[in-house]
Image: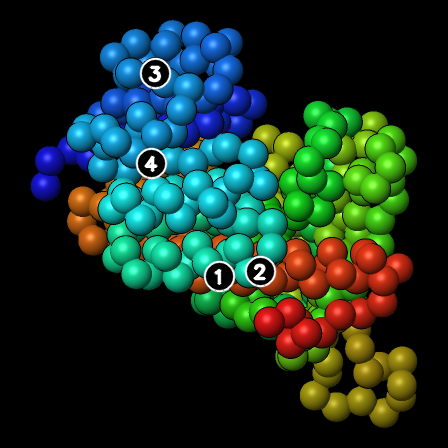
Amino acid sequence: MPRPRVAVVGAGYWGINHVRTFAGEPGCDLTWVCDPSAHALALARDLAPHARCTETIRDVLEASDVDAVVLATPAATHAELAVRVVESGRHILVEKPLALSVDEARSVKAAGDRAGVVALVGHLMLYHPVVERLGELLTSGELGHVYYLSSLRVNLGRLRSDENALWSFGPHDVSMIDGLVGQQPVSVTARGMSCLQPGIEDVVFVTMRFRGGEMAHIQLSWLNPRKERRLTLVCSQKMVEFDDVSSDKLRIYDKGYDRPPEFTQFDQFLTARHGDVHIPQVPMVEPLHAEAAHFLDCITRGVAPRTDLASGLRVVRVLAAAERSLQRDGAPVLLEEIP
């Protein structure tokens, strides 16, 4: 089929990265950029001089030279605008989170299913080469079965006034855990603090429990002295650490406890194993480029979306459960309570 003609709607803090990415993608033409800010459009023109610029999405949806839309507007607008895009017959890549409520996420999924278009959610970490390698390690059985996961995403970062740390950072970690564990949690608990802005949590701690006994813990904050992006998997055979800030992003630890076939005393029941640390070479590709290329492959080659609207809905359900737990001062929330 002809090269897809792409419009980026939302060229602000994060959306400008989509402008840069799709302007450089050889498999498409970036034909439109939309943003209400004249400053944002000026920056976009520098990156994509051949794209037409507008301040209103109406121009994009009425244009004859748009096959697909990348939606990178504020999270509160995702659901309404995503429905408008898919109902116009355009393919869509909508930034995370898919929506700020389960009802809105369901409405987007229903609209996408009716329209029959390619619909991708920007769960960027699932396109990270290290996360892909982690999935391969789990599938191969090399790590054994998962005991627990611990994820840390903190920084002294940009404050948000329209969403808390849970909804701003949490989709990254929840989507990673969803992809790696391969199941939804049974229950979710969350506690947080509003240090800088009343009613907007700057730090959030989330715990997820799964049917198989696995547990995941997530710490999220934009109020921290250091930037840290780390995911640890503790499994029955090996342990793994993914540190996205380090140059050595993946470390595989041959450490754990072994059970001898026979034992006569309790202190012989488990023996510690302190094996080697392996730092594999993982070919690095910018996740945003990998995500964009996959989106275009879905459009032109009929590839099934890896982060489809169903995955977006799953992530929103977990976030909604965590939000409800926050409101209940950390009381556990069963996922079945979230319709």
Amino acid residing under circle 1: Arg
Query: What is the secondary structure assignment of the residue under circle 2?
Result: helix
Query: What is the secondary structure assignment of the residue under circle 3?
Result: strand
Query: Can residue 199 be seen from the camera position used here?
Result: yes
Q: Residue furthest left?
A: 1
Question: Which residue bears the numbered disc 2?
Answer: 102
- Name the residue located 68 percent from the left edge and 36 percent from the top edge: 162
Q: CA distance from mark 4 to mark 3?
A: 14 Å
Q: Position of residue 40 (x, y in %)?
A: 48, 14
Question: Which residue bears the numbered disc 4?
Answer: 69
- Name the residue located 28 percent from the left edge and 44 percent from the top edge: 88
Amino acid residing under circle 3: Cys
Report if the CB atoms under discs 4 and 3 are less than 8 Å apart.
Answer: no
Amino acid residing under circle 2: Val
Q: Earlier in the sequence, mark 3 or mark 1?
A: 3
Q: Can you say whether 325 is above or below 79 in the image?
A: below
In the foreground, 217 or 295: 295
Mark 1 is surrounded, within 10 Å at the Cα level, by few (under 14), some (14 to 19) or many (20 or more) other residues, namely many
Question: Which residue bears the numbered disc 1?
Answer: 106
Q: Is residue 186 left or right of residue 298?
A: right
| Camera-side mark, 1 or 4 | 1
Mark 4 is surrounded, within 10 Å at the Cα level, by few (under 14), some (14 to 19) or many (20 or more) other residues, namely many
Q: Quadrant of the N terminus?
A: top left
